[in-house]
Amino acid sequence: LLEQTFTEYGLSGKGQSRKYLHTNDEAVPWNQVPGTFTPWQALPEPTDVLFYEGLHGGVVTPQHNVAQHVDLLVGVVPI
């Protein structure tokens, strides 16, 4: 789904997103529990830039190449 979102945004400037709810404070407004995702929502329009924060934004495997859709990729590794 991530590669599909990047492709759609690159072609049309449109797409959908969802948030991962890490903590109880993040989850309460959604009436959900931590460790779950919010429902998919349309990206606001119009936008000029798509920022993605999360895992797998630069993944390349035999089946998927998300990185090909990224203009600037910054990876951060916790130490």
Image (cartoon, grey):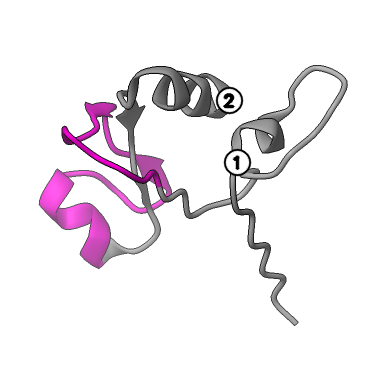
The location of residue 1, given as percent across then percent down, is 52, 22
Can you say whether 2 is above or below 73 in the image? above
At 59% from the left edge and 45% from the top edge, which residue is drawn? 71
Q: In the displayed structure, does residue 73 sit left or right of residue 24?
A: right
How would you classify the magenta stretch by its main secondary structure? loop
Quadrant of the rendered image containing residue 24: bottom left
- Looking at the rendered structure, the secondary structure element under dot 2 is helix
Q: Residue at x 69, y 38 (%)?
A: 67
Please name which of the two marks, 1 or 2, marks the residue nearer to the observer: 1
Classify residue 40 as left or right of residue 71.
left
Compared to residue 6, the image places residue 19 above or below, namely: below
Q: Which residue is mark 2?
A: 3
Q: How many marks?
A: 2
Above or below: residue 3 compared with residue 49: above
Residue at the farthest bottom position: 79
Which is nearer the eye, 61 or 69? 69
Closer to the camera, 44 or 10?
Answer: 10
**Relative horizontal placement of residue 36, taking residue 58 as reference (left or right):** left
Residue 48: percent from left, percent from top: 30, 42
Give how far across and how far down residue 44 sits, in percent.
17, 36
Residue 32 in magenta stretch: yes
Is residue 14 placed above or below 21 in the rendered structure? above
Side of 34 relative to 45 (left or right): right
> Sequence order check: which comes first, mark 1 or mark 2?
2
Query: Where's the C terminus, which quadrant?
Result: bottom right
Magenta extent: 25-50
Residue at numbered disc 1: 70
Kind of residue indicated by mark 2: Glu
- Within 10 Å of disc 2 (Cα), the crowding (few <14, some 14-19, many 20+) is some
Tell me which residue sits at (61%, 44%) in the image: 57
